Image (cartoon, helix red, strand yellow):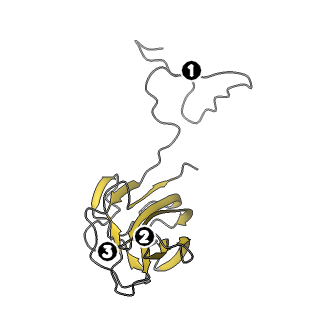
Amino acid sequence: QSGTSLEIGSSGDTITIPSGATIVNSGTQTGFGGTNTPAFEAYLGSNTGYLSNNTYVKVLCNTEVYDTASAYDNSSNYRFTPQTAGKYYVYGAVGTNANGDDRLRNSYAVIYKNGSQYRDSAVNHSGNPGRSDVLFVSAVLDMNGSSDYVELYGAVNDNSGNNQGYFASTDKYTYFGAYKLIE
């Protein structure tokens, strides 16, 4: 002990906490545990224009809530490219709207990895069309920390045939995020 600092062991030492022992922390922990970063979350700032019917379209989540490593591009390609390798929990939601009652046949939310579909979420209303949905999709993905990237896509199948479906905005309906898992 030196002044108000206490050091247990030295560099390279192993400290063993026996079974049944409890570590109580009432202060601030540093130097152990881990963090769930890089991490980001962004949402669609305003409704999209009408979309091509029943066609996957990239969701342009342009309003960042946070982006711990500036790894999400919210202005040009709308993708997350973390520069730290590891497993990532990736999630998104797509608010779909057919712009008319009894016109929504199908809705889709899709996570793409490196330009290919990885995980899909879909709702089929063909027997009982509605107007809107919010679909959630998630996956745990291995990312290489250099070139792997993820994107959020969605689709609206409006049975009017007039390309009038759209993605609904705000952080409550259409959002995209990811964070690194502590391994």
Residue hosting label 2: 152
Amino acid marked by disc 3: Asn
Question: Position of 22 compared to 120: left or right?
Answer: right
* Count of picture labels: 3
Q: Which residue is mark 3?
A: 77
- Tell me which numbered mark, 1 or 2, is placed earlier along the sequence: 1
Which one is earlier in the sequence, the residue at label 1 or at label 3?
1
Helix, strand or loop status at disc 3? loop
Inter-mark Cα distance, 3 to 2? 11 Å
Which label is found at residue 24? 1
The amino acid type found where label 1 is placed reads Val
- Which x, y percent locates residue 178? 45, 57
Task: From the top left corner, tell me how far across and down residue 45 is, in percent.
Answer: 26, 61
Q: Position of residue 27 (x, y in %)?
A: 44, 22
Asked whether the beta carbons under mark 3 and mark 2 sit within 8 Å of each other, the answer is: no
Q: Residue furthest bottom?
A: 161
